[in-house]
Amino acid sequence: MQSLRRQILAAAALCACCASALIGMPAAAQPQLAPLKLGVGMFQPDREKNDATYRPLAQHLAQRLGRAVELRTVDSWEGLAKSLANGETDMALMGPWGYVLANHFSDAQVVSTILYQGKPEYFAMIVTHPESGLNSAQDLIGPGGKTRTFAFGDKGSTSGYLIPLHFFMQQGIDPEKHFARVLYTKHQAIQMQVTAGQLDAGADYNRNRSAMIDQGLIKAERSKIIWQSAPLPNDAVAVSAVLFKDVAFVKRLQHALVAVGPLLKTQPQLLPANYTGFVNTDNTFYKPIRDAGLATGKLSPK
């Protein structure tokens, strides 16, 4: 696993820094084919902004693949996994846990991983506010945690649900029984309510926290990190089991995604700020997420 991780990190650096490695020219137009449906998770605060943010990427893929691409924002990570599984979408930019679910139940396959500041990895975290009296995760796990409120993201979220749940279970804690109140909501809402002192603590991830601070939505000093996970694989671009069998299509899609990184210099609208391109990966890269799913009982062994 460490060897694979080093290979992917090296590939990510190459994709981010070396435009000469760019491959993949526009495919010949195929007007007779039905549009490809690209599902995208709710990365932005609302659907309208999410659609506007990822429409340039959909247009880029359409041009490179020579085939119309319809963008579909799906409200929840769990819903996005289901949409890929039931054929409502053909390919998706989705969270790691959502991808693992789609792979497990419908054999969807990852073809690429998005890069954030040149890296294919990120971190889950637990945040609190300065007046909470919480200085470490142990303060939540101990007897004092029984009086606390805690927020997860939706149950299809990697950093908002699966990974912090796994952490609590490793400590012998059932969050639903341990905390005074548990709720499930959006990542941005977790940060807003925690920093406002309306919640004692909640699960989030470093990319969301940093983006909210940069956008002035929260103040850094109001969001206190008391636990952080090991590195986790970034969001996946996955295709349905049917599409994955088309080897030529998968190669064209991977080439189109690799092309994004160098193009950001002249077309920064292709990805949100701090996202720097894509690197080719496969199912093995998402093993840590799969292992957490099995350990928590959210996945059953095949």
Image (cartoon, rainbow, N blue to C red):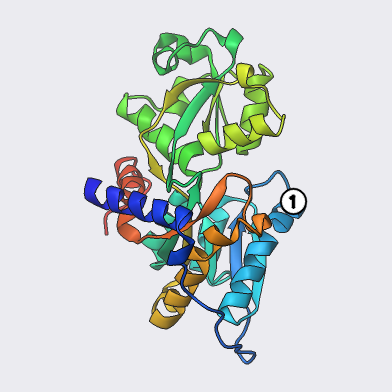
Residue 140: image quadrant is: top left
Identified at 65% across, 54% down, the residue is 268
Quadrant that contains the C terminus: bottom left
Q: Is residue 12 above or below residue 179?
A: below
- In the drawing, does residue 297 fall left or right of residue 86? left
Q: Which residue is mark 1?
A: 49
Identified at 51% across, 46% down, the residue is 116
**Residue 245 image offset from top left, x and y in percent:** 39, 79
Q: Is residue 120 above or below residue 148?
A: below
Q: Amino acid at mark 1?
A: Lys
| Residue found at the far right of this picture | 48
Disc 1 element: helix
Identified at 39% across, 15% down, the residue is 138
Identified at 31% across, 52% down, the residue is 300
- In front here: 280 or 174? 280
- In front here: 17 or 235? 17
Give the number of callouts: 1
**Residue 93 image offset from top left, x and y in percent:** 54, 58
Q: Is residue 253 above or below residue 291?
A: below
**Residue 22 image offset from top left, x and y in percent:** 47, 68
**Residue 243 image offset from top left, x and y in percent:** 46, 77
